[in-house]
Image (spheres, rainbow, N blue to C red):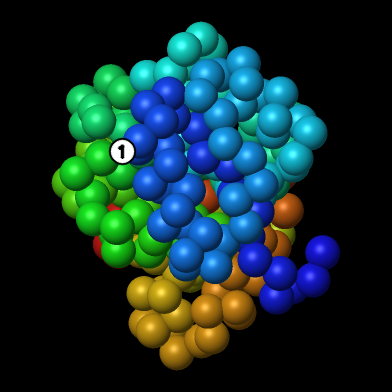
Amino acid sequence: MSENAPTRVMVVDDHPMWRDAVERDLVAAGFDVVAVAASGGEALARFHRERPQLVVLDLQIPAPDGVAVTAQVLAEDPSARVLVLSASGEQGDVLAAVKAGATGYLVKSASREQLLDAVRRVAAGDTVFTPGLAGLVLGEFRRLADPATSAAADGPPTPELTARETEVLRMVAKGMSYKQIADRLVLSHRTVQNHVQNTLRKLQLHNRVELTRYAIERGLDEDG
């Protein structure tokens, strides 16, 4: 696929008016909406057939629900990205989606511009959350981090990472976007992406959510 080809997106929502509106906005913004679905089963079948790069989905859909769809989509294609667009901003729903592998979570009160920005950023590899939810997610990762079971917590993250990769990893752990990291380090957006991708490959992780948890378990989100 050409590097300049539009991102292939699938929209999953059981409310036709909402689904059609999201599809219309994405198409108008230049995305290639290759499939829409109204249920979890339909979403999985169409994902398998169409291979979208990014899935925008609601959590409350006919079975399997959005959390299960997220997990199954990423099990089938770890390079895919999932952006949840839900009416719920409840802690349990947010954390369940993130633990399943979602790299973005917006509530449906988000504006059209916020949605399109989130889709662009998630497609580029960023994690994106409705304001107020990012701290919740990072806080949960800190709670789950158990120093007693993380033998490497007091040591370097891994001897295989370069100094620059470790520096970028620290900023990822603090929830900074690629653009913020690029501005801070005076690097191009692409260079930051390359550092993150190299780090994911070396650590055998699949996405920024896993990378963030890895870094927080080793205290890399702390200033020091």
The residue depicted at 47 percent of the width and 67 percent of the height is: 29
Q: Is residue 51 above or below residue 94?
A: below
The residue depicted at 47 percent of the width and 12 percent of the height is: 62
Q: Nearer the viewer, residue 202 or 34?
A: 34
Q: Residue 104 in the image: x percent, y percent?
A: 41, 45
Q: Nearer the viewer, residue 127 or 175?
A: 127
Q: Is residue 98 above or below residue 161?
A: above
The residue depicted at 69 percent of the width and 63 percent of the height is: 198
Q: Which three-letter amino acid code belongs to the residue tagged 1?
A: Val
Q: Residue 155 in the image: x percent, y percent?
A: 51, 50
Instruction: Using a 10 Å C-alpha cutoff, classify the residue at mark 1 as few (fewer than 14 neighbours), some (14 to 19) or many (20 or more).
Output: many
Q: Residue 78 in the image: x percent, y percent?
A: 69, 39
The residue depicted at 66 percent of the width and 47 percent of the height is: 34
Q: Is residue 207 visible?
A: no
Q: Is residue 177 left or right of residue 46?
A: left
Q: Is residue 195 left or right of residue 48?
A: left
Q: Residue furthest top?
A: 63
Q: Is residue 7 above or below residue 208?
A: below
Q: Residue furthest right?
A: 1
Q: Is residue 147 above or below residue 162?
A: above
Quadrant (top left, top right, bottom left, bottom right) of the C terminus: bottom left
Q: Is residue 190 left or right of residue 215?
A: right
Q: Residue 55 in the image: x percent, y percent?
A: 55, 41
Quadrant (top left, top right, bottom left, bottom right) of the N terminus: bottom right
State the residue position of label 1: 137
Q: Is residue 106 visible?
A: yes
